[in-house]
Amino acid sequence: MEQPRLRGWKGKDVMKNMQWFLIGVIGGFVAAHFMNKDPRGHDILAEVDARINGFTAIIGDAYREQEARLTEPDKN
């Protein structure tokens, strides 16, 4: 019996895309490392980190609030 495959996806294409993805991730880490060495770059990365932390805190609070609301017994 033949294995089901996604249309338009071939083994070589998936591996090539994965390779480009990994090259991009590694390149991003290298760029961030060099950027962090410069004081201006360090400030920019610190600001980005603060914004990401603020965003994840908002999402986490909303999730916990929704979870508490859904797990409360009905007060009718």
Image (spheres, helix red, strand yellow):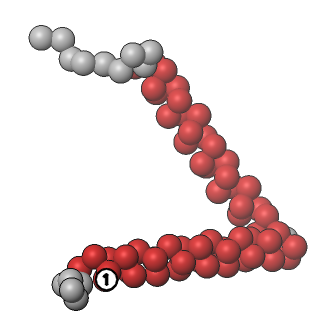
- Residue extending farthest to the bottom is 75
Q: Residue at x 75, y 76 (%)?
A: 47
**Image quadrant assignment for residue 24:** top right
Q: How many labels does the image show?
A: 1
Mark 1 sits on what residue? 68
Left or right, 23 with respect to 66, comes to right
- Label 1 neighbour load within 10 Å: few <14, some 14-19, many 20+: few
Which of 32/2 is in front? 2
Q: What residue type is labelled 1?
A: Ala
- Establish if 9 lies above or below 35: above
Q: Which residue is drawn at 49% across and 21% down?
A: 13
Q: In which quarter of the image is the C terminus?
A: bottom left
Q: Where is residue 55 in the image (x, y as percent from the top left)?
A: 59, 73
- Residue extending farthest to the left is 1
Q: Where is residue 51 in the image (x, y as percent from the top left)?
A: 67, 74
Q: Residue at x 12, y 11 (%)?
A: 1
**Image quadrant assignment for residue 42:** bottom right
Kindly tell me whether residue 27 is visible in this rendering. Answer: yes
- Establish if 41 lies above or below 20: below
Left or right, 8 with respect to 70, comes to right
Q: Which residue is drawn at 46% across and 27% down?
A: 15
Secondary structure type for disc 1: helix
Q: Where is residue 28 in the image (x, y as percent from the top left)?
A: 67, 52
